[in-house]
């Protein structure tokens, strides 16, 4: 086997990929530019859930949504909280879009350090890992901030302008007001009495995500001063709004709601939404179902797909290897074999030329020594026999 070193000057991307396939373990292509920005070879074009581009989050729709006297509506009435909830929905969409845009700009401004060009397979694996880490970090940061805001709002004791988590009650005896916190029943439309266990009541002082099915009520009442502050829907609502919840705060109740009613024209007509508002498209391609909670969509920043693409060619052109080298082994041909044989013969001739004279001298020395020891003398030939010597 014969080892060779090959070199290709300024290889094209096609040549590089061919060499990568042929010599994956020995190919070396040093980059002429070692620091490469991500935006030189990566591109993002996120596609968001249709609600974030719909009329439902437009200011025109929100400003005309049940423009009512809030004090006349029951806390569980959808019309009381609808405007605030859709303001929250619009804010969530804007937060998601702004966060993704900001994080992508920071991400694409980073640089990858590459001393030598890597194969397409290695490149794609590295890009996939980078993108996955960025997406995970972005989503986790937004979720953390949203939870932090909710906790601050709850612990600070802020009273909603809708009087859904707290409301003021006047004491006519002393002409003073005191704050009463709201409580929501869990699971049933009617709570028969005020002696409910804690398992059926959600208290707004302990948590802000107490929710109950939203509906339309034909009365406006608050619990009397001498009764429990549980919002008891008795009598039941005229009708409920499918998927929509109400509760302590518009933010938390909207997150737990679904938008299933807003995919249906009949449902929109039922709750009095203008014919000018186009329902969401239930047949549109989406990874979120019609009955998906808003919180589930927000946890994914309403992203249907990030539509990220990476171009290996752009990466390779930015790397710009000036030369690639590789080693390979090859069986010798007849000429190579003859050359090796002659070299071997020449080497043996040289060695023998040195060793033979030394061996001859050594042999002669030993022969002379042996002859000297074999010559008899008169002392060891007492019989006087004639000795014959062969020269």
Image: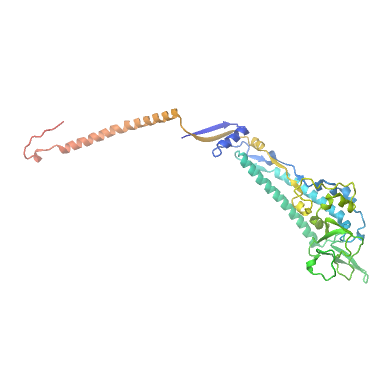
Quadrant for the C terminus in the image: top left
| Residue nearer the viewer, 218 or 368 | 218
Q: Position of residue 144 (x, y in %)?
A: 74, 55
Horizontal relation, residue 318 to residue 88: left or right: left
Give me the residue at 23% from left, 35% from top. Answer: 365
Q: Position of residue 176 (x, y in %)?
A: 91, 68
Residue 297 is left or right of residue 331, and the answer is right
Tally of numbered tags: 0
Residue, x 79% and y 55% (percent of image)?
A: 255
Q: Tell whether 348 sits left or right of 377.
A: right
Percent position (x, y) of residue 316? 64, 36
Does residue 29 appear in this view? no
Colour mode of the rendering? rainbow
Query: For residue 382, what is the image quadrant?
Result: top left
| Frontmost residue, 256 versus 162 | 256
Q: Is residue 23 above or below residue 173?
A: above
Q: Residue furthest top?
A: 335
Q: Residue at x 46, y 29 (%)?
A: 333
In this rendering, the answer to whether 387 lies above or below 164 is: above
> Seen from this angle, which residue lies furthest left?
383
């Amino acid at each position: 086997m014969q080892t060779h070193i090959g070199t290709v000057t300024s290889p094209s991307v096609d040549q590089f990929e061919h060499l990568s396939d042929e010599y994956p373990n020995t190919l070396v292509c040093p980059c002429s530019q070692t620091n490469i920005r991500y935006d030189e070879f990566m591109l993002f074009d996120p596609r968001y859930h249709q609600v974030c581009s719909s009329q439902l989050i437009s200011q025109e729709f929100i400003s005309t949504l049940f423009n009512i006297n809030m004090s006349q509506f029951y806390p569980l009435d959808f019309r009381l909280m609808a405007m605030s909830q859709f303001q929250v929905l619009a804010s969530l969409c804007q937060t998601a879009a702004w966060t993704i845009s900001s994080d992508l700009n920071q991400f694409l401004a980073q640089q990858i350090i590459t001393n030598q060009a890597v194969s397409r397979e290695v490149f794609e694996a590295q890009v996939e890992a980078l993108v996955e880490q960025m997406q995970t970090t972005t989503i986790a940061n937004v979720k953390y901030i949203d939870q932090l805001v909710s906790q601050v709002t709850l612990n600070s004791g802020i009273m909603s302008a809708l009087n859904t988590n707290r409301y003021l009650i006047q004491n006519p005896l002393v002409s003073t007001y005191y704050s009463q916190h709201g409580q929501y029943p869990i699971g049933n439309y009617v709570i028969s009495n005020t002696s409910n266990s804690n398992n059926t009541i959600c208290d707004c002082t302990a948590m802000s995500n107490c929710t109950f099915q939203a509906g339309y009520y034909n009365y406006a009442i608050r619990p009397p001063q001498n009764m429990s502050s549980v919002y008891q829907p008795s009598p039941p609502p005229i009708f409920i709004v499918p998927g929509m919840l109400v509760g302590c705060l518009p933010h938390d109740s909207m997150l737990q709601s679904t938008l299933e009613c807003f995919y249906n024209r009949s449902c929109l007509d039922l709750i009095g939404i203008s014919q000018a508002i186009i329902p969401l498209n239930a047949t549109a391609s989406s990874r979120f179902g019609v009955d998906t909670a808003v919180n589930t969509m927000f946890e994914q920043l309403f992203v249907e797909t990030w539509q990220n693409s990476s171009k290996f060619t752009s990466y390779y052109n930015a790397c710009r290897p000036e030369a690639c080298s590789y080693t390979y082994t090859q069986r010798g041909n007849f000429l190579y074999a003859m050359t090796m044989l002659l070299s071997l013969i020449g080497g043996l001739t040289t060695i023998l030329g040195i060793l033979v004279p030394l061996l001859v001298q050594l042999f002669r020395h030993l022969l002379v020594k042996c002859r000297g020891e074999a010559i008899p003398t008169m002392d060891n030939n007492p019989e006087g026999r004639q000795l014959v010597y062969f020269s």
